[in-house]
Image (spheres, rainbow, N blue to C red):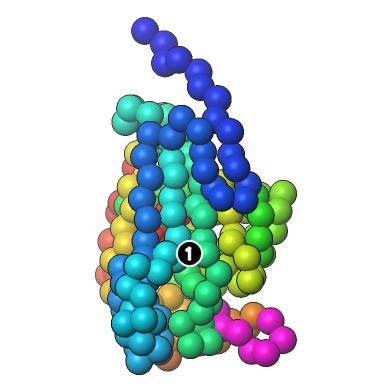
Amino acid sequence: MYIEPTSHTVNSMTGDLSNSTGRYRKKISDLKGIYADHAKFFALCAQDPDRIVYDVCEVRPKAESGDLIFGTTHMLPGKVGSEFFVTRGHIHACANRPETYYGESGFGLMVLESPRGDVRIMEVTPKTIIYVPPMWIHRSVNIGDMPLVMSFCYPVDSGQDYDVIARSGGMAVRIVENGLGWQAIDNTDYKPRTEEQIQAIHATQD
Ligand code: S6P
Ligand code: ZN
């Protein structure tokens, strides 16, 4: 009648999680339309379409409201032109569901954007917890030259809306290498959300 408690070991270097219930991988060729430099993107895909950008390993108990999903994201280092490797990014389909991320190894950023276009950029370093509040679009970026491993935890009934970013022409900022380190630059393709689009996101809350 009660769910059995479980314990899981995180390999901070590889992101492997013991007794996980699922995993998936995103290769460079899965990430079309995300990066600004299309020519460099297609060149990378032609060179090695199977180049791994990130792996997710998770524990997903039965979908009962009130429960959690938790796991790890392991991102390889790399760039498309000057733009660092990123995850697809999303807002939770039920947008008022929050999330935490914990830095296991490597150096990264969490780029957050509110429906109205406010941007926050948080550094993800080992032993740092990042709180992603309800209603924020979130995307991870590996700004280092080694893998970035993070663990995460969020409510089981969150879901992911990946189109929210594409509908606006990307997130408001892109994270690029500038010779000294990382820099956030404006995404020139970005179209701020209309009031109607903002209200549609708000309407997903329960
Ligand atoms: C899910 C959570 C993470 C990401 C993972 C990959 O809500 O934020 O598990 O799924 O970091 O990112 P993405 O944007 O491809 O789902
Ligand atoms: Zn999420």
Which of the two residues, 54 or 139, is positioned nearer the viewer here? 54
Is 69 covered by the magenta stretch? no
Kindly identify the residue that appears in the image at 43 percent across and 75 percent down. 171
Query: Does residue 141 appear to the left or right of 205 in the view shown?
Result: right
Outermost residue toward the front in this view: 47
Picture coordinates of residue 165, whole percent (x, y): 35, 70
Which of the two residues, 1 or 106, is positioned nearer the viewer here? 106
* Magenta span of residues: 175-181
The quadrant holding residue 66 is top left
Q: Where is ligand 1, by quadrant?
A: bottom left
Picture coordinates of residue 36, whole percent (x, y): 40, 86
The quadrant holding residue 49 is bottom left
Q: Is residue 196 above or below residue 24?
A: below
Quarter of the picture containing the C terminus is top left
What residue does disc 1 label?
A: 139
Kindly identify the residue that appears in the image at 42 percent across and 16 percent down. 3
Picture coordinates of residue 72, whole percent (x, y): 51, 47
Q: How many marks?
A: 1
Q: Residues within 10 Å of mark 1 (few under 14, many from 20)?
A: some
Kind of residue sitting beneath label 1: Arg
Kindly identify the residue that appears in the image at 33 percent across and 47 percent down. 159
Element at badge 1?
strand
The reply to whether the residue tagged 1 has its Cβ within 8 angstroms of ligand 1 is yes
Quarter of the picture containing the N terminus is top left
